[in-house]
C-alpha cells in the first residue's frame, strides 16, 4: 500500500495529529505499508521548519522512510529559504502538483 498524507494548516493541534496519524499507520501491524509520503503546503509549512515544535517527530518520520515534500510556492510566499526546513525535507515545485502526481501513481490520499 502507498499513501500520501496532505497537510496544509497552521493549526498546531493538527500538526501533532498529522504526525501521530503517520506514526500510527507505520506502527499498525495489520497494514502492509510500502511507501508513505507527506506533502505540506500553505500553512502546513510550519510543520517542517527548523522552528517547528514537532521537529523531532518530523525527523523521526524521515528516519522511518517517510518522504516529506514541501511546496516551493509556499516557501517563496513565506519569504524563507530551503535552509529553514528540517534536513531531509524535499522541495517540490507545487504541493498540489505533487499530490496529483502521487495519486495518479496509485497513492491513497489522506487528509487528517
Image (cartoon, rainbow, N blue to C red):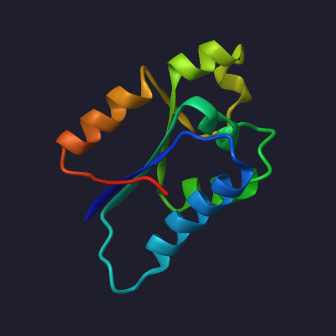
In the image, residue 21 lies at what x, y percent? Answer: 53, 66
In the image, residue 53 lies at what x, y percent? Answer: 80, 51
Q: Is residue 72 left or right of residue 32?
A: right
The answer to which of 9 and 3 lies nearer the viewer is: 9
Is residue 103 positioned above or below 91 on the image?
A: below
* Residue at 71% over, 18% down: 80
Is residue 47 positioned above or below 18 on the image?
A: above
Q: Quadrant of residue 3?
A: bottom left
Q: Is residue 84 left or right of residue 14?
A: right
Q: Is residue 6 left or right of residue 88?
A: left
Quadrant assignment for the N terminus: bottom left
* Residue at 52% over, 17% down: 73
In the image, residue 60 lies at what x, y percent? Answer: 63, 60
Furthest-bottom residue in view? 30
Q: Quadrant of residue 88?
A: top right
Q: How many marks?
A: 0
Is residue 87 positioned above or below 32 on the image?
A: above
The answer to which of 5 and 92 lies nearer the viewer is: 5
Q: In this view of the protein, can residue 25 be seen by the observer?
A: yes
Is residue 12 positioned above or below 81 on the image?
A: below
* Residue at 19% over, 44% down: 105
* Residue at 27% over, 34% down: 100
Q: In this view of the protein, can residue 86 be seen by the observer?
A: no
Q: Is residue 53 left or right of residue 44?
A: right
Amino acid at each position: 500500500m502507498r499513501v500520501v498524507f496532505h497537510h496544509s494548516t497552521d493549526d498546531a493541534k493538527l500538526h501533532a495529529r498529522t504526525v501521530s496519524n503517520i506514526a500510527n499507520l507505520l506502527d499498525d501491524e495489520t497494514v502492509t505499508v510500502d511507501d508513505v509520503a507527506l506533502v505540506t503546503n500553505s500553512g502546513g509549512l510550519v510543520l517542517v521548519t527548523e522552528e517547528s515544535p514537532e521537529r523531532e517527530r518530523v525527523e523521526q518520520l524521515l528516519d522511518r522512510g517517510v518522504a516529506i515534500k514541501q511546496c516551493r510556492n509556499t516557501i517563496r510566499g513565506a519569504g524563507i529559504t530551503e535552509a529553514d526546513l528540517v534536513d531531509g525535507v524535499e522541495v517540490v515545485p507545487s504541493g498540489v502538483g505533487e499530490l496529483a502526481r502521487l495519486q495518479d501513481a496509485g497513492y491513497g490520499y489522506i487528509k487528517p
